[in-house]
Amino acid sequence: MNQDELKEAVARAALAYVVEGRVVGVGTGSTARKFIDALAEMKDRIPGALASSEDTRKRLEAHGIRVFDLNEVESFPVYIDGADEVDRRLRMIKGGGGALTREKIVAAVAEKFVCIVDRSKYVETLGKFPLPVEVVPMARAYVARELARLGGEPCLREGFVTDNGNLILDVGKLGIDDPVETETRINQIAGVVSNGLFALRRADVCLLGTEDGVRTIEAE
Ligand code: 5RP
Protein backbone atom coordinates (compact mmCIF):
# COMPACT_ATOMS: atom_id res chain seq x y z
CA MET A 1 0.00 0.00 0.00
CA ASN A 2 1.22 3.50 -0.73
CA GLN A 3 1.06 6.38 1.74
CA ASP A 4 -2.23 7.62 0.33
CA GLU A 5 -3.86 4.21 0.78
CA LEU A 6 -2.54 3.96 4.34
CA LYS A 7 -4.06 7.37 5.11
CA GLU A 8 -7.34 6.20 3.59
CA ALA A 9 -7.31 3.06 5.75
CA VAL A 10 -6.79 4.94 9.05
CA ALA A 11 -9.36 7.57 8.08
CA ARG A 12 -11.97 4.85 7.56
CA ALA A 13 -10.95 3.04 10.76
CA ALA A 14 -11.55 6.27 12.71
CA LEU A 15 -15.27 6.15 11.88
CA ALA A 16 -15.59 3.48 14.60
CA TYR A 17 -14.75 6.18 17.18
CA VAL A 18 -17.47 8.59 16.08
CA VAL A 19 -20.28 8.60 18.62
CA GLU A 20 -23.71 8.62 17.02
CA GLY A 21 -25.90 11.52 18.12
CA ARG A 22 -22.90 13.62 19.20
CA VAL A 23 -20.75 16.19 17.41
CA VAL A 24 -17.27 15.11 16.34
CA GLY A 25 -14.13 17.26 16.31
CA VAL A 26 -12.29 17.22 13.01
CA GLY A 27 -8.64 18.00 12.35
CA THR A 28 -6.83 19.43 9.35
CA GLY A 29 -4.59 18.06 6.60
CA SER A 30 -4.67 15.36 3.95
CA THR A 31 -5.50 12.51 6.36
CA ALA A 32 -8.23 14.56 8.04
CA ARG A 33 -9.65 15.36 4.59
CA LYS A 34 -9.98 11.62 3.91
CA PHE A 35 -11.71 11.26 7.27
CA ILE A 36 -14.18 14.01 6.35
CA ASP A 37 -15.02 12.24 3.10
CA ALA A 38 -15.61 9.00 5.00
CA LEU A 39 -17.63 10.82 7.68
CA ALA A 40 -20.03 12.05 4.99
CA GLU A 41 -21.34 8.47 4.76
CA MET A 42 -22.69 8.70 8.31
CA LYS A 43 -23.62 12.38 8.36
CA ASP A 44 -27.29 11.62 9.09
CA ARG A 45 -26.28 9.94 12.37
CA ILE A 46 -24.45 12.94 13.88
CA PRO A 47 -25.72 16.47 14.57
CA GLY A 48 -22.57 17.95 13.05
CA ALA A 49 -18.90 18.66 13.60
CA LEU A 50 -16.35 21.08 15.06
CA ALA A 51 -13.74 22.29 12.59
CA SER A 52 -10.08 22.96 13.41
CA SER A 53 -9.53 25.20 10.36
CA GLU A 54 -11.30 27.09 7.61
CA ASP A 55 -10.19 24.40 5.14
CA THR A 56 -11.86 21.73 7.25
CA ARG A 57 -14.98 23.84 7.77
CA LYS A 58 -15.39 24.29 4.01
CA ARG A 59 -14.96 20.59 3.28
CA LEU A 60 -17.42 19.57 6.00
CA GLU A 61 -19.99 22.06 4.71
CA ALA A 62 -19.45 20.92 1.14
CA HIS A 63 -20.59 17.47 2.30
CA GLY A 64 -23.65 18.98 3.98
CA ILE A 65 -22.28 18.42 7.49
CA ARG A 66 -23.28 21.20 9.90
CA VAL A 67 -20.33 22.97 11.54
CA PHE A 68 -20.87 24.16 15.11
CA ASP A 69 -19.18 27.10 16.83
CA LEU A 70 -16.99 25.66 19.63
CA ASN A 71 -18.50 28.23 22.00
CA GLU A 72 -21.86 26.47 21.64
CA VAL A 73 -20.47 23.09 22.73
CA GLU A 74 -19.48 22.39 26.31
CA SER A 75 -18.06 18.94 25.71
CA PHE A 76 -17.90 16.31 23.01
CA PRO A 77 -16.56 12.77 22.92
CA VAL A 78 -13.89 12.63 20.26
CA TYR A 79 -11.46 14.67 18.16
CA ILE A 80 -9.90 12.99 15.13
CA ASP A 81 -6.80 14.43 13.47
CA GLY A 82 -3.53 13.57 11.73
CA ALA A 83 -0.02 14.46 12.89
CA ASP A 84 3.41 15.12 11.45
CA GLU A 85 5.13 12.94 14.04
CA VAL A 86 3.88 10.77 16.90
CA ASP A 87 5.95 8.87 19.45
CA ARG A 88 5.07 5.71 21.36
CA ARG A 89 3.68 7.74 24.28
CA LEU A 90 1.38 9.42 21.73
CA ARG A 91 2.96 12.83 22.04
CA MET A 92 2.92 14.59 18.68
CA ILE A 93 4.29 17.32 16.47
CA LYS A 94 1.48 18.94 14.48
CA GLY A 95 1.01 22.07 12.42
CA GLY A 96 2.46 21.05 9.07
CA GLY A 97 -0.76 22.50 7.66
CA GLY A 98 -0.49 25.57 9.89
CA ALA A 99 -3.69 24.88 11.84
CA LEU A 100 -1.98 24.03 15.14
CA THR A 101 -3.65 26.65 17.33
CA ARG A 102 -7.24 25.79 16.43
CA GLU A 103 -6.33 22.09 16.51
CA LYS A 104 -5.01 22.53 20.04
CA ILE A 105 -8.15 24.37 21.13
CA VAL A 106 -10.57 21.78 19.73
CA ALA A 107 -8.42 18.94 21.10
CA ALA A 108 -8.42 20.57 24.55
CA VAL A 109 -12.21 20.41 24.76
CA ALA A 110 -12.48 16.84 23.44
CA GLU A 111 -12.80 13.93 25.84
CA LYS A 112 -10.68 11.71 23.57
CA PHE A 113 -8.06 12.48 20.89
CA VAL A 114 -7.72 9.87 18.15
CA CYS A 115 -4.61 10.41 16.03
CA ILE A 116 -4.69 8.95 12.51
CA VAL A 117 -1.34 8.52 10.76
CA ASP A 118 0.49 6.35 8.28
CA ARG A 119 3.53 4.46 9.57
CA SER A 120 6.02 7.09 8.28
CA LYS A 121 4.86 9.44 11.08
CA TYR A 122 5.62 7.02 13.93
CA VAL A 123 9.02 8.01 15.40
CA GLU A 124 11.31 7.06 18.25
CA THR A 125 12.01 10.70 19.22
CA LEU A 126 10.10 13.83 18.21
CA GLY A 127 11.93 16.60 16.42
CA LYS A 128 13.08 15.57 12.98
CA PHE A 129 10.04 17.37 11.59
CA PRO A 130 10.62 21.15 12.11
CA LEU A 131 8.40 22.35 14.94
CA PRO A 132 5.74 24.85 13.75
CA VAL A 133 5.33 27.87 16.04
CA GLU A 134 2.50 30.36 15.44
CA VAL A 135 3.55 33.95 16.20
CA VAL A 136 1.91 37.35 16.24
CA PRO A 137 3.43 39.19 13.22
CA MET A 138 5.02 42.06 15.21
CA ALA A 139 6.88 39.50 17.39
CA ARG A 140 8.32 37.46 14.49
CA ALA A 141 11.95 38.60 14.78
CA TYR A 142 12.00 38.57 18.60
CA VAL A 143 10.49 35.09 18.81
CA ALA A 144 12.96 33.85 16.17
CA ARG A 145 15.88 35.15 18.28
CA GLU A 146 14.51 33.47 21.41
CA LEU A 147 14.02 30.16 19.58
CA ALA A 148 17.60 30.38 18.30
CA ARG A 149 18.72 30.90 21.92
CA LEU A 150 17.06 27.56 22.71
CA GLY A 151 19.25 25.98 20.03
CA GLY A 152 16.64 25.90 17.27
CA GLU A 153 16.88 27.08 13.67
CA PRO A 154 13.68 29.04 12.99
CA CYS A 155 12.60 29.61 9.41
CA LEU A 156 9.65 31.80 8.41
CA ARG A 157 7.02 29.89 6.42
CA GLU A 158 7.02 32.12 3.34
CA GLY A 159 3.71 33.46 2.01
CA PHE A 160 1.66 31.76 4.72
CA VAL A 161 -0.85 33.40 7.07
CA THR A 162 -2.79 31.30 9.58
CA ASP A 163 -6.58 31.35 9.93
CA ASN A 164 -5.94 33.61 12.93
CA GLY A 165 -3.97 36.18 10.90
CA ASN A 166 -0.58 35.15 12.29
CA LEU A 167 2.72 33.78 10.95
CA ILE A 168 4.45 30.41 11.31
CA LEU A 169 8.10 29.85 12.20
CA ASP A 170 9.22 26.28 11.43
CA VAL A 171 11.95 25.43 13.91
CA GLY A 172 14.55 22.83 13.00
CA LYS A 173 17.34 21.35 15.12
CA LEU A 174 15.48 21.58 18.44
CA GLY A 175 16.55 18.71 20.63
CA ILE A 176 13.21 17.62 22.07
CA ASP A 177 14.31 15.36 24.93
CA ASP A 178 11.42 16.43 27.14
CA PRO A 179 8.38 17.34 24.96
CA VAL A 180 6.30 18.71 27.87
CA GLU A 181 9.15 20.96 28.97
CA THR A 182 9.82 22.20 25.42
CA GLU A 183 6.13 22.83 24.76
CA THR A 184 5.76 24.80 28.00
CA ARG A 185 8.96 26.78 27.51
CA ILE A 186 8.16 27.90 23.96
CA ASN A 187 4.64 28.92 24.99
CA GLN A 188 6.17 31.33 27.51
CA ILE A 189 7.92 33.44 24.86
CA ALA A 190 5.98 36.69 24.42
CA GLY A 191 4.38 36.76 20.98
CA VAL A 192 4.01 32.99 20.66
CA VAL A 193 0.38 32.02 20.14
CA SER A 194 1.01 28.27 20.37
CA ASN A 195 3.47 25.65 19.22
CA GLY A 196 2.98 22.35 17.43
CA LEU A 197 4.05 20.11 20.29
CA PHE A 198 1.05 18.17 21.59
CA ALA A 199 2.58 16.70 24.75
CA LEU A 200 0.54 18.40 27.48
CA ARG A 201 -2.52 17.20 25.59
CA ARG A 202 -1.32 14.10 23.76
CA ALA A 203 -3.45 11.60 21.86
CA ASP A 204 -5.38 8.90 23.71
CA VAL A 205 -5.40 6.50 20.79
CA CYS A 206 -3.30 6.28 17.63
CA LEU A 207 -4.54 4.46 14.55
CA LEU A 208 -1.37 3.62 12.64
CA GLY A 209 -1.56 2.60 9.00
CA THR A 210 0.87 -0.24 8.23
CA GLU A 211 1.32 -2.83 5.48
CA ASP A 212 -0.26 -5.38 7.83
CA GLY A 213 -3.34 -3.29 8.49
CA VAL A 214 -4.37 -0.60 10.95
CA ARG A 215 -2.67 -0.95 14.35
CA THR A 216 -4.37 0.55 17.40
CA ILE A 217 -1.96 2.03 19.95
CA GLU A 218 -3.35 3.21 23.30
CA ALA A 219 -1.60 5.85 25.41
CA GLU A 220 0.56 4.28 28.14
C1 5RP B 1 -2.20 20.44 10.22
C2 5RP B 1 -1.71 19.24 10.94
C3 5RP B 1 -1.84 17.93 10.25
O1 5RP B 1 -2.54 17.05 11.07
C4 5RP B 1 -0.48 17.38 9.96
O2 5RP B 1 0.27 18.34 9.25
C5 5RP B 1 -0.55 16.07 9.18
O3 5RP B 1 -1.02 16.33 7.90
P1 5RP B 1 -1.24 15.20 6.81
O4 5RP B 1 -2.39 14.37 7.27
O5 5RP B 1 -1.53 15.97 5.55
O6 5RP B 1 0.04 14.40 6.71
O7 5RP B 1 -1.23 19.28 12.04
O8 5RP B 1 -1.93 21.61 10.92
Image: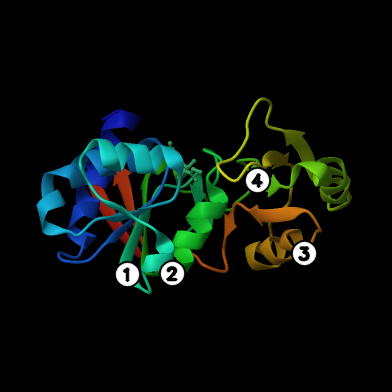
Q: How crowded is mark 3: few (under 14 residues within 10 Å), some or many (20 or more)?
A: few
Q: Is residue 208 above or below residue 200?
A: above
Q: Which amino acid does label 1 sit on?
A: Phe
Distance between the Cα atoms at labels 3 and 2? Answer: 22 Å
Q: What residue type is labelled 3?
A: Gln
Q: Residues within 10 Å of mark 1 (few under 14, many from 20)?
A: some
Q: Which of marks 4 and 3 is nearer the N terminus?
A: 4
Q: Which of marks 2 and 4 is in front?
A: 2
The numbered disc on residue 207 is none
The numbered disc on residue 131 is 4
The numbered disc on residue 109 is 2
Under tag 3, what secondary structure?
A: loop
Residue at image mark 3:
188
Asked whether residue 203 is in view, the answer is no
Asked which quadrant contains residue 158, the reply is top right
Q: Earlier in the sequence, mark 4 or mark 1?
A: 1
